[in-house]
Structure formats: C-alpha cells, structure tokens
C-alpha cells in the first residue's frame, strides 16, 4: 500500500478536481476516466487501414509515452481489453450468475423468518444464520452490482436498482454510495489516507476493539452517516433516501413481528442488529485497507 501526502488528503476532503457525481449506469466509464471515443476511433482506423492503422496507433502511443502520457496509454489499452472481454461474454457471464446469486439470497428470506419463530434454540440460530447470510449477499453484493449499473443496461432500471439495493437494503444514500464507490474505492484502492481507508478511522480505540468489536456497530453507523450526507442532496433526493431507508428497516421489523412472532419490539430490533452485523467484521477487513495493527 502507498502513503500519500497530507495535501492530497486535504484536496480530496475539499472536493478538489470538480468531479461530478457518478451514476450507476456510468460505472465502467467512470473507472477509467479517459476518452474512450478516441480509443474507439483508433481501433476503427486500425481495422480500416490494416497494418497502416496499427503502425499509426503504435507511433501515437510511443509519442504519448515520450510526452509523459504512459499512464493514459496503459488505461486506453486496459479499456480496449475490458470492452473486448465484455463484448465476447455471454449474458449469463455478464449478469446471469450475479442475478442468480441475488435471487437465491432473496429465496433464503422466507425460511429464515419462519425459523426465527421457533422456540428451539438450534432452529432459531439457523434462522439467524440464514437471515445474516441473505442480508450480507443482498446488501454487499447487491449494492456493489447496483453501484456499477451491472444489473441492467437501461439507465432507468439501473437507477431503480441502485435506490433499492443501496437505500432500501443497504440503508445508505444511493448518490453518495455510487459516487464514493466509483470515485474513491476504485480510484484510490490500497492508498492509505484516500478511498476506503479514509472512511473507517477510529484512532481512539485499541486495535482489538477497532478490528473486532467496532465493526459490529456498522448497521447503526451506516444510516447515521447517510443522514450526514443528505446536506449535499436536493430536498427530493434527501426525502427519498429517508423514506427508503425507513422502508427497509420497518419492513424487516414488521416481518419479524408478524411472521416470526416476536412479542417484544426490542427483541426484534436486537435480532435485526445481530443479523445485519453478522458479516460486518469480514466486510471491514476486506474492504477497508487501513487497519491498525
């Protein structure tokens, strides 16, 4: 991992660069931050002119590298490879596998709610495990796919799934979630002080608490952080986020009370917390790269 100067972190916090918010259907394009039109034109010219086009592109690449454009050339080549791989992939490879996993996660919910209504401790624990696994798949994998717009080619449906998975299931704001993932996570992966490592800092805690106890509070921290992000949203977006997050919490609470048969609202809320926090520790360890060893 790399360390970055303090002024870089200050620039990021100040919103330097003037980048616009990423949208879920712009995920792949936002990853590379290059002019893919020029890349496509280069490829078309190479096809039309045969060897001449290839030589011209190579000559242009050499000139760009000599002028300090090595990074841009590499990203253009990476974009070509990604576009080629996506084009050659089947629908099942692009979306089918992930959608199947999400469907299976949703199918785990009915038996989970029913098992949570059992008075037998082992059956009850099994219900909690199923609920925790289902929530982890939906809220982590679902939000990740939705932030990239990978669930649909339609911009309208991509935005719908982003709101559903990130706000209803993930208890976060879709706008900040997509922008943070595309602009921070992929742009600054493994760079200490930027990206994910800038979102999970509690230096006052001992390392064991920081690594293995504090992450259990993520289900509580996430909606609170989302509320803090609403100041940068329009009134309509902020209202939608609040309603969608409330819908996600209330629907699970209602099902626990009326399907699982919980008698006390506090026991239902405790069950929700345990299920939602079940995989928060590995989530933090995998996604947040600045850990205090």
Image: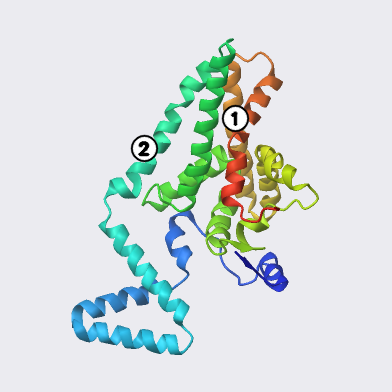
Residue extending farthest to the right is: 204
Task: Describe residue 248's horizontal placement relative to residue 206 as left or right.
Answer: left
Residue 187: x and y in percent read: 54, 64
Task: Using a 10 Å C-alpha cutoff, classify the residue at mark 1 as few (fewer than 14 neighbours), some (14 to 19) or many (20 or more).
Answer: many
Q: Is residue 125 above or below residue 143?
A: above
Residue extending farthest to the front is: 293
Q: Is residue 10 above or below residue 290?
A: below
Rendering quarter of residue 121: top right
Instruction: Residue 275: give its label.
Output: 1
Residue 279: x and y in percent read: 58, 37
Q: Residue at coordinates 19% horizontally, 79% vertically from top-left?
A: 48
Residue extending farthest to the top is: 119
To which residue does mark 2 refer? 100
Q: Residue at coordinates 26% horizontally, 50% vertically from top-left?
A: 90
Rendering quarter of residue 277: top right
Task: Describe residue 94's horizontal placement relative to residue 263 as left or right.
Answer: left
Q: Is residue 5 above or below residue 124?
A: below
Task: Work out whether mark 1 precedes mark 2 in sequence or the reverse, and give the earlier one.
Answer: 2
Q: Is residue 173 visible?
A: no
Task: Describe residue 48's horizontal placement relative to residue 170 as left or right.
Answer: left
- In the rendered image, the quadrant that contains the N terminus is bottom right
Cα separation between marks 1 and 2: 22 Å
Secondary structure type for disc 1? helix
């Amino acid at each position: 991992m790399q360390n970055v100067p303090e002024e870089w972190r200050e620039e990021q916090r100040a919103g330097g660069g003037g980048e616009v918010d990423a949208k879920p259907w712009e995920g792949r394009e936002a990853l590379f931050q290059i002019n893919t039109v020029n890349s496509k034109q280069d490829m078309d010219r190479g096809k039309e002119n045969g060897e001449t086009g290839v030589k011209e592109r190579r000559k242009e690449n050499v000139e760009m590298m000599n002028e300090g454009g090595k990074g841009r050339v590499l990203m253009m080549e990476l974009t070509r490879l990604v576009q080629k791989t996506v084009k050659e992939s089947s629908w099942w490879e692009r979306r089918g596998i992930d959608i199947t996993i999400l469907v299976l996660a949703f199918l785990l919910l009915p038996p989970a709610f029913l098992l949570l209504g059992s008075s037998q401790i082992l059956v009850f624990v099994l219900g909690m495990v199923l609920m925790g696994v289902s929530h982890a798949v939906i809220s982590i994998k679902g939000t990740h796919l939705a932030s990239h717009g990978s669930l649909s080619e339609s911009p309208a449906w991509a935005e719908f799934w982003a709101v559903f998975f990130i706000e209803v299931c993930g208890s976060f704001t879709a706008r900040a979630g997509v922008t943070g993932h595309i602009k921070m996570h992929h742009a600054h992966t493994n760079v200490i002080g930027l990206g994910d490592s800038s979102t999970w800092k509690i230096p006052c805690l001992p390392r064991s608490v920081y690594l293995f106890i504090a992450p259990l509070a993520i289900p509580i921290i996430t909606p609170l952080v989302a509320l803090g992000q609403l100041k940068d949203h329009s009134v309509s977006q902020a209202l939608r986020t609040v309603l969608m997050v409330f819908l996600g919490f209330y629907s699970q609470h209602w099902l626990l009370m009326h399907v699982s048969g919980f008698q006390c609202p506090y026991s239902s809320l405790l069950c929700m917390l345990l299920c939602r926090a079940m995989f928060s520790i590995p989530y933090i360890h995998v996604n947040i790269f600045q850990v205090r060893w």
